[in-house]
Image (spheres, rainbow, N blue to C red):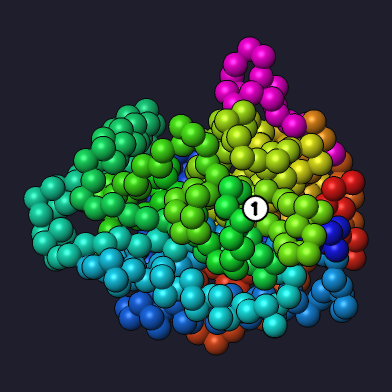
Amino acid sequence: MSNSYKKIRFIGYAIPTTPAKLVSIGNPNGPGAVAGTYLANPDIQTDMNNRIAIMKNAVDIAKSQLPAGENDVINVFVAPEFYFHGTEGPYIYSTPSEDPVETLRQQLLATFNANDYPNLTFICGSAITTMIKNIDEVYGSTSAKTRNSVVQNLSEQWLASFGPLKDVIFDMLVNFIKNCHSYPNCEVRNRSVIVSNIPIRTPEVDNPTNLMTTEKYYVSNEDFLLYDVTGKQVITEQMTAYPTIDLSAGDAKQSAFDKYAIFRQNDIDPANPIATTVTDYGIEICLDHSDTRLRRNIDNEPSLIGGIHVQLIPSCGMQIDLPSVAADSQGFVFNCDGQYALNNNPSGLGIINQVNCLYANYIDGSNSAYAAHSQLARVLDPATGGDPNAQRSTNATFESLDENNISVFNVTEPAGLNDYFAGGPGQIHIYGLDDPYTLYP
């Protein structure tokens, strides 16, 4: 990163990305799950085009608030997990050459180009996909039909029951789904597209780019619908599994589109490369954060200089979790979530889940079942030890941030929004609008 970049600002697009017609099974903000239906266009390209347009509408609202003429501030924009999906959950394609994410990332790069959006780095939520040669064969298989029938029946019986029996049924449901994850009908990929108009690269290879992806590995009980309430065939939670990722040698990216999570941002000056300052970023998509994906390797990243300085969590059902914080001293942890509000306050400063943070909440005025939030924490003393439970490990501590340094802007509802998002247009949350944070004090 060029020495001209001394400060950083965080922008969250707090828009609910949960399905429509939600039916909660258990507590979806905890170990529960949901039924409902997916809002999307049946044509994948049309769906991606319109979701990008909705995101651009929000980005332009954020951009209009930023001070003019800045040249020393990095602006990091984060959208929630599951921002891009199809009518059946994942975008379904049949051959590698049809992978929608390859098209999506080029469209995002063109839309959020360096000329129109200088000094901006975009974490564009996530996109879910699955490659299946014959989806009708999968839906018609005894395996899929049996597990879908069992889960829907258990879910409906849970809704109809009360008392201790309700807990018994819920335990049966959770355990059945966990077993199904071990024998999936399809492998689903959950990828976040990174577009950066300040050059980024893998930590070990000095080959700047403006485009990367990272991938999630930990599937929860609620990443996909348990069943579609309209009777539509969909890829359900009990049909899926994510691909494994070998983290035994760390999580630093080795190529732009591999599965790993840590990348480096810099603006290399060919005339003076030694003087270039670099910042390492790590991305954890939702439950990967709860699984301490980045924390577990803080002592096992030989390529990193000083550790992860910016830890980003695009999610749909997650918040900053103390044992999972892996950012270094004076580093940042930023979460943008598309499922729930942290509390009933519009915004504020407080200790949430043992983390001292700034936060803001969005709740859909017409349906309080749909909500979103963002939160920012800054590390004072970094965590030690990759295992939070080890005797000599310590969790991070945090600075107390200025509660006046967060700005909330309502998003003007774009045309066609309700065909894609069930919880309204969301809000823009800007941390450090007038007083961006010093990157390295």
Q: Quadrant of residue 42?
A: bottom left
User: Relative to the observer, which residue lies in front, 76 or 356?
Assistant: 76
Can the viewer see residue 36 in this picture?
Answer: yes
Residue 410, placed above or below residue 199: below
Residue drawn at point x = 85 percent, y = 63 percent: 4
Residue drawn at point x = 49 percent, y = 34 percent: 249
Look at label 1 and name its amino acid. Arg
Q: Is residue 151 magenta?
A: no
Give the image location of residue 41, x and y in percent: 37, 79
Q: Main secondary structure of the magenta part?
A: loop
Callout 1 secondary element:
strand
The part of the chain drawn in magenta is 382-399
Q: Quadrant of the N terminus?
A: bottom right
Residue 224, placed above or below residue 295: below
Q: Quadrant of residue 134?
A: bottom left
Give the image location of residue 323, x and y in percent: 63, 30
User: Relative to the observer, which residue lies in front, 360 or 363?
Assistant: 360
Give the image location of residue 73, x and y in percent: 82, 64
Residue occupied by mark 1: 264
